[in-house]
Image: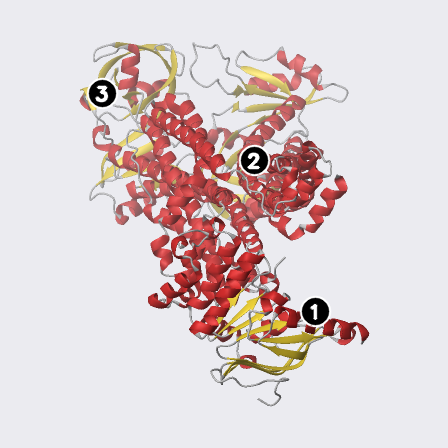
Amino acid sequence: MLRTALRNVLAHKARLLMTVLAVMLGVAFVAGTLVFTNTISDAYQKSSQKGFQGVDVAITPDKKDDDSANPGEPPRLSQQLLDRASKVSGADSAYGVVQGDSALADKKGDLIGGGFSNRGGNYYPGADGKDARYNMTEGRAPKATGEIALDSKTAERGHYKPGDSIRVSVNGPVRTEKVVGVFTTDDGNVAAGGTLALYDTATAQKLMGKPGQFDEIDVKAAAGTSQATLKSSIDKVLPEQAKADTAKKLAKDQAKAIEDGMSSLQTAMLVFAGIALFVGIFIIVNTFSMLVAQRTKELALMRAVGATRRQVTRSVLIEATIVGAIAAVVGLVAGVGIGAVLRSVLNSTGAKVPDGPLIVAPTTVLVSVLVGVVVTVLSAWLPGRRAAKIPPVAAMNSVHATPTTRGLVVRNTIGAILAAAGIALVISGAGMGSDGQGPMAFGAAVLVIGVFVLTPLLSRPLIAAAAPVLRIFGMPGKLARQNAVRNPRRTAATASALMVGLTLITGMTVIAGSMQKGIDKMAADGLRSDYVVSMGGTGGRPLSPEVSKTLAKLPEVTSISALRSSPARVAGDTDSLTGVDPKAIKDLVNVDFTEGSFAALGGTKALIDDKIADEHDWKVGSTIPVTYEDGRSGKLTVGGVYKGNQMIRGVMVDNAAVTPHMATVADFQVMLKTKGGATEHNKDLLKKTLGENPAIKIQNKQDTSDEIASAFTLMLNMLYGLLAMAVIVAVLGVINTLAMSVFERSKEIGMLRAIGLDRSGIKRMVRLESLVISLFGGVLGLGLGVFFGWAVGELIAAELPSYELVLPWARMGLFLLMAAFVGAIAALWPARRASKLNMLMAIKAE
Amino acid sequence: MTTMPLGVKTTAHSAAAAARATDLSKVYGEGETQVIALDSVSVEFRQAEFTAIMGPSGSGKSTLMHCMAGLDTISSGSARIGDVELTTLKDKKLTQLRRDKIGFIFQAFNLLPTLNALENITLPMDIAGRKADQAWLDQVVATVGLAGRLKHRPNQLSGGQQQRVAVARALAGQPEIIFADEPTGNLDSRSGAEVLGFLRNSVREMGQTIVMVTHDPVAASYSDRVVFLADGRIVDELRNPTADGVLDRMKRFDAKGRTS
C-alpha cells in the first residue's frame, strides 16, 4: 500500500503542487510565528536578566489589595528606608531608583523615539562614584541640576554629544539641559528602542517624584549572603506599604510577563495562520477528490482484486500523509526564514528588538510538522471515504456515476437549515446587546458552515446572473459560464476558499469604518472646546498644572479647564473622581443632562452619569460618600445627572474639591476655547506659549479625528497584511481548480481547437471561468462580511451610542476588483497551458 | 497537380479539387530515432466526392488527415484546402480556416457535454459569431433525424445519436470539406451504418466533400473512392468499392508488407 501511495504521489507531482504550496504556506505561517515570538521572547528575557545584574533584593511600594482606607497610590520610599536597608546585616550597598517620564527633543524640536517609551531616571553613584547600571562611554555622569546624560542610542538618533544643549519635558514645562555624558545600559526599555535620560538623584526626585523619595530601592548582598537571607533581613525594616523581592523572583516575574505578552501576540498571529490553513483545506479536498475521481477505474480494480474498503481509504490517506509531510517540512524551513525576516523588518522600523539567537524550539518543529500532516490527512479523509465507496464493478464500466443529484438534495437541505439557523442566531444575538456575543459567535460559525454547504447550490443562480456580461465575450464566455457550474462541488470549494478571506476583510473593514465614524462623531459631538492639550506618547501621562496656568494667562484663551483624575472610592466602589473647572466646563464639553446642569457644579456638589445614578438610585440632592486618594472621607452632593458616554462619564467634581487630596497634582488633559476658534494662528500661539514642547500634543477636533483615523488605518492595514496569506492560499486554490479542469477537459479543448476556436479564445474561456469563480467567492464574501459587520456593529452600538453602520462602498468595490484580479492572476498559467495543449493528443481516442 | 495518383479518373460532376497534397512529407524525431510518417504523398480530394483513406495501423492515414486538415504541421511539401496553402498559415489563420472551411467528425469525444444537441451543432458558427442558415440547418437536422432531440444534452443521447449530432455539426456550416476520423469506431454496426449512410447521402444529395479515415472495409465501402496507404506512401486506389473488394486489396498489402 505504501508503495502504491508513493508511486501515486510521484505520478501526480504537478497536480499535487498547489496542494503542497497551500499546506506549506500555512505551516510556514505557523512556524514563522513560533520562531519569531520565541526569538523575541528569548531576547527580551536575556536582556531583562542582564538588567538585574548587581541587584539582589529590590524594595518597591506596595498597595495592599484590601486597603480600602487608601484608594490612592502607595507612598514612595523614603531616604530613611534606603539608609536602613543599606545597613541591614548581609547588605553590601543599596541605591535608590527614581523613575519617570522625560521626553527629549531632537535638534529640530521633534520627539525622539516617537512616544514609545520616553523614560527618565537617576544616576546614583555608589561608593566608587559609579552607578553599576549605567556605563558612561562619553563625558561624565550628571551631578547637578541642569545636567543630563543620554543613552547612546538616543544620543545617536538625536545627534547629541556632551556639551550640547537639549530640550526636555518631564510633565509639561520645557527645560533646557546640558548633555554631560552618554552611557550604555542593559535596561529593557532602551534595548527595545525607548529613550532614557539620567539626572542626578536630587534633580530626578524634584522633577519626577518628590525630594527625598524613591520609586525603588535596590540592595546588593555582601559576599556570602544569599538573596533569600538578605530579603528576610530587609523584610524586618520595611514599612507597611512596601515589599521586598529577590532579584531572582523579579527576573522570573518579568520573564513571565514578557512571555505572557508574547503569547497573546503569538495567539493572534496563530489565529491568522489557522485561517490560512483552513482555506488550504478546500484546496486539499479538491485535489484529492479529483485524484480519486480520475483513479476510479484503478481503485475499482484494486477492490475487484481483493483490496478492502479500508485499504483503499488508507492508500489515499497514506498519500495525503506523504504530501502533508513534504509540505510541512518545506513550510517549516520557510517559516524559520520568515521568523528571521520578521525580526529584521521589525528592527528596521525602529522598534528595536534586543539581539539574540534565532530560536527554533523543538516544539516549533513538532507543532509545524504535525499541523501540516494532520490538516492534510483530515482534509483527504472525505475523498478517501468516497474512494472506498467505489464499487468493484466500476472497473468494468466506462463511467462510474456518483449519486450527485441525490447527494446535492440532501446537502442543500442541510445547508439551508444550517444557514437559516445561523442567520436567526446572529440576528437574535444582535438584538441582545452585550450579552449577544455568545449566540452571535455561534450563529456566525453555523451560518458560515451553512454557506459552505450551500455554495454548490448558490453557484448556479449566482453564476447564471453573470450570463449577460459573459455574453459579450461570445462563445468563450458561454462556455466559461457553463464550465464554472459543471462541477458545483469543486467550484464551491474553490470559491469558498476565497470567500473566507473576503468575509473577514469586508467584515473588519465595515466594523472599523463604522467604529471610526462613531468615535469621531462622539468626539465631535462631545467636545465644544477648540483644543485639547495632553501629553504625547502612550498611556495618558500626566501634565503639569503649570501648563493650564500658563495657557490661562493668554488673552486669546476665552475658556479653559484642566481635567484631573484622582482615584477614590465612591459609595464603597473603586472609582475615580474627575476634576474640572466648574466655570469653564460648560463651554468645553457637551453632555445631555437628565437632571440639573453644569451650573450646579462647585464646592461639594458633583455631577454623576446616568449609570451611576441608576445603580445607586441617586437623584439631585442625594449624598455620595467618598474616600479620597489620601484616605480621607468626605461627602459629595449630587448636583446633576448627565448621560455618560465613552469620553465623559463618572463622577465630575470641582478641581478645588479634589486637588487638596491628590498626592501629585497633575492634569490628564487641558481643554480650552480660543478667540476665533481653531485656527493655525491660535495653534501656533499655544505651541509657542508652551515653549515648542516636544512631548505635548495640542489637538483640535480635526487632529483628534485624524488621530483616530490613523489608528484605525494602521490596525486595518495590519489585519489586511495578516489576511493576505489567506487570500494567497485562495489564489493557489483557484489555480489548482483551473489546472485540474484544463487537465480533465483536454479532449474537449482539443476538439474546440480543431473545429475552430483559436488560442486566444481558449485562453479567454479559461480566464473567464476563473473570473466567474473568483467573483462568485468575492460576492459571497462581501455579502457575509457586510452581514457580520452589521451584526457585530449592533453589539458595539450597545456600548457606543454614536456608532452607526457605514458601508465602505469604495472599499467593497475594491475588494470585488481584487477578487477579479485574483481570478485573472490565477488563470494566467492554466490558460496558457490550455492554449498550448497538443490538439492531436487531445482528440485521439483512448 | 504534378504527380497524379494512381488510376485517377476525373468524374463529370467533380472536376475541381477540394483539397490537395503535393509531395507531402511528415517526419517525427531526428537522427536515429527519426520516423517518416508520410513520404512524399501526393493526393487530391475532389469536390462532392466521398473518399476513404485506408491502411494498416502505422501506415500514416491519420497523419495524412491531420496534415490535410491543418491540425498538424508539415515537414515538407504542400497541403491545400481549395486555393489556400496551409503551410504558410500561422496558427490564428489556420484556426479560422478550420472553423470556416473544414468540418470535423472524430471517433469519440465529439461533443461538449455542457451544450445541448442544437448548441453543439451550431458551435463552429457560434465561435465564428456567424448566424446559422436556418433553412439549411433545418434540412441537416431533418436529414440526420435529430428533430425531436435538439434540446437534449449529449449524455441523454445514445452513442449513435451523439455521432449524428457530430455529423450535423460538420454539415451545418457548409464547409468545403469534412474530415472524419474513424467516425464509426465507437459505434455498434447498426448505428455505424446509419452514420455512414448520412455521410454518403450528404455527398450525393448535398454535394458535400468528405474524407474519411477508417480501417473498416465495410465503412470504406460507403465511399466513392478508397485510397490505400502503407508505410507513409499511397500504394493503391479503388473506385466504387465494395467491402469484399477493399478487403482483398488490404490482404494484398498485408502480405506485401510481411514479405518486404
Q: Nearer the viewer, mark 3 or mark 2?
A: 2
Which numbered dot is residue B58? 1
Side of A699 where B231 appears, left or right: right
Which residue does the numbered mark 2 point to in the structure image?
Answer: A270
Q: Nearer the viewer, mark 1 or mark 3?
A: 1
Vertical placement of A809 versus B187: above or below? above
* Contact (Cβ within 8 Å) of mark 2 with mark 1: no
Q: Position of residue A75 (x, y in %)?
A: 48, 18
User: Tag 3's secondary structure?
Assistant: loop
Residue sitting nearer the eye, A566 or A497? A497
At x 67% / y 13%, what residue is drawn?
A233
Residue sitting nearer the eye, A840 or A195? A840
Vertical placement of A827 versus A204: above or below? below
Quadrant of the rendered structure where residue A301 is? top right
Q: Amino acid at mark 2?
A: Leu
Q: Earlier in the sequence, mark 3 or mark 2?
A: 2
Mark 3 → mark 2, Cα distance in angstroms: 51 Å
Side of A7 where A675 appears, left or right: left
Which numbered dot is residue A73? none
Q: Amino acid at mark 1?
A: Gly
User: Tag 2's secondary structure?
Assistant: helix
Color scheme of the displayed model: secondary structure
